[in-house]
Image: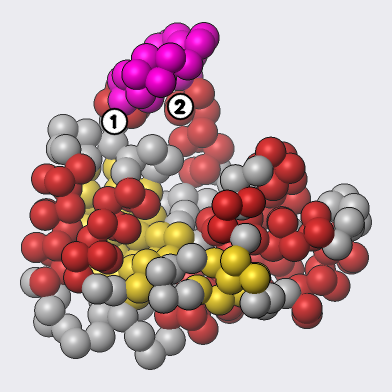
């Protein structure tokens, strides 16, 4: 394995990319960065500043005072504060679309993500990392998983957690629509990059997937 390696990861929602690559990063002692956290962090920052998300000018103006870093545990630090547990709040989830679909915000995020990846070993996960953010990464991975496998996993998880209602067909259709939306976005669309390693997790356990990725990373010279 190279002394310094940058691994760019994209893939369909629910394919296991974040879970698997986080474990890979821990085993290889490499920084892990789920770029979705940066968009969530800025959404939270906007909420704390009480801005109107539909006012693009005001939202874009906040970028100049937004500072995002990762601590040693790969947790997001926003202007010196750790708000990790707030990034999945209802208000953040509800409003993140305004942030993710803003062109200037996205340009800022892409530049910031490249700076974070500069001169260090890193595993970066997102939706357009292999195609836009780090197109020259040492290893580009595209995670995929059949809709059937993802729907089955979600259905079984819901059963285990006693989540009601729990309908397989509704879950399947929801995943299908999410895939279509991600692949047809006007900004940051999900694509398979040239020279990307397409990794199908449909029939793999998490541990099996982790071992296969580690083997692939170590093969990069």
Residue at 15% over, 46% down: 207
Which residue is disc 1 drawn over? 146
Numbered range of the magenta stretch: 152-173
Question: Does 159 lie within the magenta span?
Answer: yes
76 relative to 149, above or below = below
Say what secondary structure mark 1 lies in.
loop
Which residue is disc 2 drawn over? 176
93 relative to 203, above or below = below
Q: Nearer the viewer, residue 88 or 85?
A: 85
Residue 11 shows up from this direction: yes
Residue at 39% over, 43% down: 12
In the figure, residue 48 lies in which quadrant? bottom right
Q: Is residue 106 left or right of residue 31?
A: right
Question: Does 165 lie within the magenta span?
Answer: yes
Residue 56 on image: x %, y %:
86, 60
Mark 1 Cα-neighbour bin, 10 Å: few <14, some 14–19, many ≥20: some
Residue 203 on image: x %, y %:
16, 33
Q: CA–CA distance between discs 2 and 1? A: 10 Å
Mark 2 Cα-neighbour bin, 10 Å: few <14, some 14–19, many ≥20: some
């Amino acid at each position: 394995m190279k002394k310094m390696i940058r691994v760019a990861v994209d893939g369909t929602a629910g394919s296991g990319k974040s879970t698997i690559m986080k474990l890979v990063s821990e085993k290889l002692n490499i920084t892990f960065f789920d770029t979705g956290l940066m968009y969530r962090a800025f959404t939270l920052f906007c909420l704390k500043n009480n801005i109107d998300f539909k006012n693009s000018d005001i939202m874009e103006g906040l970028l100049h005072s937004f500072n995002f870093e990762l601590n040693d545990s790969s947790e997001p630090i926003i202007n010196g504060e750790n708000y990790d547990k707030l990034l999945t709040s209802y208000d953040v989830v509800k409003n993140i679309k305004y942030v993710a679909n803003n062109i200037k915000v996205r340009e800022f995020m892409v530049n910031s993500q490249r700076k974070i990846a500069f001169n260090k070993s890193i595993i970066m996960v997102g939706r357009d990392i292999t195609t836009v953010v780090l197109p020259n990464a040492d290893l580009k991975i595209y995670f995929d998983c059949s809709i059937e496998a993802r729907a089955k996993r979600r259905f079984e998880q819901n059963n285990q957690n006693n989540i009601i209602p729990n309908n397989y067909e509704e879950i399947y259709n929801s995943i299908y629509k999410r895939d279509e939306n991600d692949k047809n976005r006007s900004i940051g669309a999900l694509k398979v990059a040239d020279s990307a390693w397409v990794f199908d997790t449909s029939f793999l356990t998490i541990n099996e997937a982790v071992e296969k990725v580690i083997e692939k990373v170590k093969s990069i010279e």
